[in-house]
Image (cartoon, coloured by chain):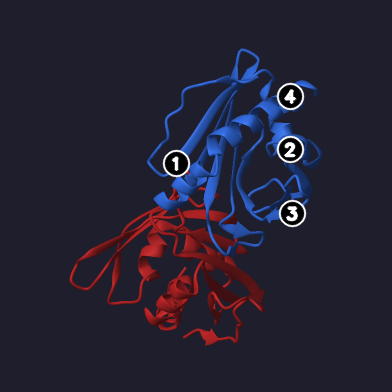
Chain colours: A red, B blue
Amino acid sequence: MTTIIDATPSDDRELVISRLIDAPRDKVWRCWTEAELLKQWFVPKPWSIGAVDVDVRPGGRSNITMRDPEGNEYPNAGVYLEAVPNEKLVFTDAFTEGWNASQKPFFVGVLTFEDEGGKTRYTARARHWTMEDKEAHEKMGFHEGWGQCADQLEEVARGL
Amino acid sequence: MTTIIDATPSDDRELVISRLIDAPRDKVWRCWTEAELLKQWFVPKPWSIGAVDVDVRPGGRSNITMRDPEGNEYPNAGVYLEAVPNEKLVFTDAFTEGWNASQKPFFVGVLTFEDEGGKTRYTARARHWTMEDKEAHEKMGFHEGWGQCADQLEEVARGL
């Protein structure tokens, strides 16, 4: 299990979780950027991941299909905005690849990976354009879901 | 005066202008990316530009203050999303520097600069998240305003 770390949102439209992951940050980075690894942890089980099609660079696609326990699929299309290996990854659903405005910008995810004695301080911020979206995201179970995923991520990273 | 070129929007939430500018594309690029040059053409006269603070790289700030003929100032904060020298520049008001979600994402601008016999085919696309914003932008005088600015840009580029 990851260790929960205190983290304060930057403003009232942000949700944040922070964890100490028992794996070095290059492995945590790989879990976030390699399709075959993403599939293993990216949604809280018993949900699963269908297709993963990612091109991790500014403007590159981040297209990931989630699948519920009944097998219904939920495609998510987005792009990466910034990718600093082993340090920072930023992505959003506000655009699809090619800088097309999406149907509905919901949030931008800002992930940081910091070394902490060989472990990784992992902080995930979800920033929203409206208070309504932030509150909806929180009610959808942001903290529990991203927390469970962080545990799953740690398990995959430790196995690398 | 720039030569008007036919250009079709990519979808119904996009506005576009395209012009043949009588200057090579490295000079057109400079007009878009150097603060002192931006000040000379970026709003239709008799409006003018106050402060310009830009850092032209993905995630860098694009903060430009416009000034009406009465001297009232209108600050605009945004970021660049992609910057390929002499070829392509993408920016948006959906974020402020540091990937903070802005108060209201209005549009993403996608500019391309293509060589055409020593002149520059300049295409500026404004993509919106909603039809309402696209229509509002059109009514604000997008085509006339961006067209007049293209003429002003050409004049500055030719003087370099």
Could you tell which of marks 3 and 4 lies nearer the N-terminus?
A: 3
Residue B100 lies left or right of residue B155; in this view the side is left
Quick one: label 1 or label 2, which is nearer the N terminus?
A: 1
* Residue at numbered disc 3: B73
Q: Is residue A42 above or below residue B71?
A: below
Query: Which residue, as the protein is rendered here, is positioned at the far front?
Result: B70
Front residue (pair A136, B132): B132
Q: Pinpoint the chain carrying mark 4.
A: B
* x 41%, y 83%: residue: A144
Residue pointed to by mark 2? B46
Pinpoint residue A124: horizontal percent, then vertical percent. Answer: 54, 73
What residue is disc 4 on?
B155
Are the residues at dot 3 and dot 4 in contact (C-beta closer than 8 Å)?
no
Distance (Cα) linking label 1 and label 2: 27 Å
Label 2 element class: loop
Of pointers 2 and 3, the one earlier in the residue sequence: 2
For the residue marked with disc 1, what is the amino acid?
Answer: Glu
Local SS, label 3 = strand
Q: Quadrant of residue A24?
A: bottom right
The span from disc 2 to disc 3 (Cα, nearest Å) is 13 Å
Query: Between marks 3 and 4, how big is the CA–CA gap?
Result: 25 Å
